[in-house]
Image: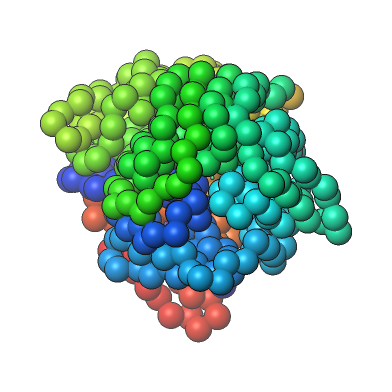
Amino acid sequence: MDTLIVERSGPLRGTVEVSGAKNASLPIMAACLLTDEESVIEHVPQVTDVNTMAEILRVLGVEVEWQDEQVLIRPGHKPSWTAPYELVSRMRASVCVLGPLLAKHGRAKVAMPGGCVIGSRPIDLHLEGLEALGARLTIDHGYIVAETPRLRGTTIHLAGAFGSSVLATANVMMAATLADGMTVIEQAACEPEVVDLANCLIAMGAKISGHGAPLIRIEGVSRLHGTHYRIIPDRIEAGTLMIATAMLGGDVRIHGAVPEHLGAVIGKLTEANVSIESLDGCVRVRSDRKLKSVDVTTLPFPSFPTDLQAQFLAMMSVSQGVSIVTEKIYPERFMHVPELKRMGAQITREGASAIVKGVERLSGAPVMASDLRASAALVLAGLTADNSTQLHGLEHLDRGYEHLEQKLTRLGARLRRINSASQNLSVGG
Ligand code: EPU
């Protein structure tokens, strides 16, 4: 098992390039099931979740081959329709093969995703949307079994108790591309990753309009073709690097960060006394570490993203004043709080909110990552803390951040990975 040793660092200086978006890559790879032709997807990050999606596609009879930063995806002549529990249980996003399999082959058998550490994550909206398109669904021995002679376009309302759903929108949109007639998705998710998927589907021959707004129209076509498509930069990685610079101080140019994808984050960082400038092709972040506490509430795009809540909370832990961080997507997504408290943060939980009283300095400690974004938050906290922090549970970090340690190291941060089993040191960068 690897451990990350994180030392007090800063300021950060230099330039850094954002990788392709994990959360756009996953449904776009699944979308390649909708065609018989080869697709080439560029700017795909080499992270564990992407490898899991590649494994699922292979089990479904698809050839997946890496060539540097691009992935070649070739559907084979002997397709399968079953996504097994062993793979789906590793990553909930696996469920987005359901819509494409159903649309292309008229049947799918996908393991029901189980519980999730960031809270209850039902898939009722995915299932209701596909049923509205004419699929017959049953749950059989832990599997969703879906069948249809032909999907038919209709109007589908996709909002749940916590607003729109990113992957339910993706699933239904993918299925509707090959349905008979027109599908209208109301209350569709507007996240940049949904827009990226729609743009990729359009490049494959789909007829989609309205993506990026809550009402998406999809006119079904009889077939889709292969494509060559480049994934958007990862806004959550960009936001994590912006928050790192804010916390450690310095002057960093983040290449590939798209300001339009990060409006709410830029707004909150500016309020907290961080200087953000949009330059040609990059965002420049400058900070003197004198951060002001600000309140933040996570909501669907274009509001502040839940996937940056943990990192922002770590920043508020070392800011001047008191802030209230409220989680409106996953009310239980606060597993990083007890770990930050072990490092001296002053945080009180009240339901879906955390009240954070900024302290002068955190103190390094052994901590355990519980999910992907919590692990990033603990890395940032460790970089501002006295002495060293030992971060365990790195498999979470590796699910979604490509070369984060190397990128931070090149900017001047001090962190290194230790393979505890062999006592081998591998230094980031
Ligand atoms: N929801 C339902 N029913 C459903 C689906 C969702 O009630 O059928 C609820 C969820 O429980 C949640 C809200 O709707 O309260 C929004 O969840 P959403 O469906 O949008 O989440 P997701 O599509 O499963 C994606 C990202 C998550 C990110 C969320 C929210 C991918 C692969 N995952 O998940 O990313 O937090 O959108 O933006 O795109 C991460 O990268 O760390 C991560 C967890």
72 lies left or right of 214? left
Q: Quadrant of ligand 1?
A: top right
In the image shown, does 260 or 53 lie closer to the viewer?
Answer: 53
| Picture layout, residue 345 above or below residue 304 | below
Across and down, in percent, residue 241 comes to: 34, 41
| Picture layout, residue 234 above or below residue 86 | above
| Picture layout, residue 397 above or below residue 13 | below
In the image shown, does 261 or 265 lie closer to the viewer?
Answer: 261
Quadrant containing the C terminus is bottom left
Name the residue furthest bottom.
422
146 lies left or right of 267? right
In the image shown, does 379 or 93 lie closer to the viewer?
Answer: 93
Work out whether residue 381 can be spotted. no
Name the residue furthest right.
141
Across and down, in percent, residue 174 comes to: 52, 41
| Picture layout, residue 253 above or below residue 191 | below
The image's colouring method is rainbow
Quadrant containing the N terminus is bottom right
**Residue at the (36%, 57%) spot, across then down:** 39
**Residue at the (46%, 64%) spot, across then down:** 75
Across and down, in percent, residue 54 comes to: 49, 64
Work out whether residue 25 can be spotted. yes
**Residue at the (29%, 48%) spot, across then down:** 230
Tell me the quarter of the picture where residue 55 sits. Answer: bottom right
Across and down, in percent, residue 83 comes to: 66, 61
